[in-house]
Image (spheres, helix red, strand yellow):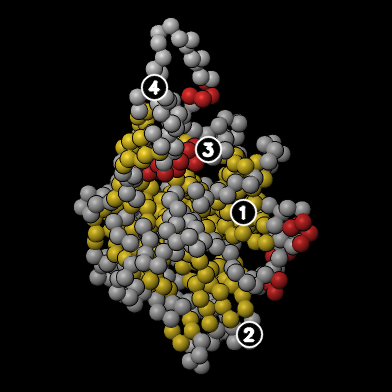
Amino acid sequence: MAAYGGGTVSTGRRTAITAGGLVVVLLLAGCTGDARPPVDTRSADATPLPAPEPEHTRVPMWTPGPTVASEQTVRALELSWPDGTPVEIEVVAPAAVVRAVEGEDFLPFASPVPSTTWPLAVLGDGSMVVRGEQIATEDGERWRDTMGLVGPQVEEPYRPFDMAGVVPGSESTSTLAGTVAVDGQRSVWTMEFEADDGAIGWQVLTADEDGAVSVVASSAEDWGAVHEHALGGPSYINGGPAPIALGGRVYLSIPLDDAAMSSGYGWMLVSRGLVDGDTRVEEVGVWDPVATSDAVYVRGESADGAGDGMTEIRRVDGDPVLLLPAASPMVLDGAAGEWLVLSSPEAVLAVHPTDRRVVGVGRSTPTDPESPGAGHASGGSDLVVWSDDPYAKHGSTHFVLDPDAAAVWGLPSLLDDVVVNSHGILGWMESGGPGRSVRYVRWRS
């Protein structure tokens, strides 16, 4: 994002000189309005003119430019801490956003991922979970996604996961749904499938350190045994849940039936042990579950009815950490280390729930007036990434926020997407690049 430059704007007899976010207005001598007052040629003993009324001398000194307006938008967000104290946001001004410089802010490194695979996540040892090429089933008309590991060394070959017997049917087609969650050396993801008999469903899968895949949860389960209002089986076959993983457990949002929906409790959060299968209903009537490095958080109604007209961000099985208006467009997008990531079309926020610190930056207007607007932000192990114009025809400018340093950079070229953000590693697709080429860098913040 370029800093807003200086310039001169003339309005009537007023001249406003701008420099960055500073606006100085010079009033021409004797000017008390939009027209120059007449010259008084009367003699000294003439009756003096009455002084003008105060409202006649009030001239607007300046109009907020894009920089000031953006900062005001972020500061105007009506956020408060659980005790009612207003949140003071550390605003990163647009003029403070700098373009990242290779060699200073990041260092490229050799691609560890073959061009025939697609990066999805980074495990604790630096190896990458990748999606391999789709392979044709025996009838040649349907396809299956393959997944596996690459690295952590560049020369290590692609090692596919052992998925034998996992997806139902010998000729079923399956596709990756959403993103891959990581818990140490374990990866967790959702696959949607169509089996030989035409059945459609989803499975939440996990791969251990040896690459052996097992089923964690599926649409075929009797979710009514977990919660009386839960939808499951044939009633819940489209759009499998996006899992998050932490502390040896996977967390899933499962929809509830119409009776629960009419009471405002449309979803429940279920957790299940990745090894022992222990299942718990963690929360009911919540949405947007995300995991920081040490806890799972959700957005939901105030548990004690306090804060009329407000919703809360709270730790699962714990206390609320942030209050925001129920009608707020802010979405709980993810996490970056210990920071929660929230975004709206106007702002991106990083919230530290224990230090009570909030860092925010305003978002720019899409270049295409027909664009649906800004997309969601996403977090990694330490950085936040987003694009303010994700549907631009020739690639978008992506931004990187380091919440600890309260610093924001614009990546140096137009990108199609940032596909990896973990352990200080970014992987992005440069617009117009060959095929699915991804450039990998280590961030130096």
The residue shown at (45%, 61%) is: 368
Please, what secondary structure does the residue beneath circle 1 have? strand
Residue 55, percent across and down? 53, 24
Q: Amino acid at mark 1?
A: Trp
Residue 5, percent across and down? 31, 44
Please, what secondary structure does the residue beneath circle 4 have? loop
Please, what secondary structure does the residue beneath circle 3 have? loop
Instruction: For marks 1 and 2, give the CA distance.
Output: 31 Å
Please, what secondary structure does the residue beneath circle 2 have? loop
Q: Tag on residue 76?
A: 3
Q: Residue furthest left?
A: 103
Instruction: For marks 1 and 3, give the CA distance.
Output: 25 Å
Nearest to the eye among marks 1 and 3: give it.
Answer: 3
First in sequence, mark 1 or 3: give its number: 3
The residue shown at (43%, 6%) is: 45
Image position of 343 (left or right of 327): left
Q: Amino acid at mark 2?
A: Gly
First in sequence, mark 4 or 3: give its number: 4
Q: In the image shown, does 437 or 361 lie closer to the viewer?
A: 361
Residue 390, percent across and down? 44, 61
Nearest to the eye among marks 4 and 1: give it.
Answer: 4
Q: Tag on residue 39?
A: 4
Residue 349, percent across and down? 47, 45
First in sequence, mark 1 or 2: give its number: 2
Res 254 quadrant in image: bottom right
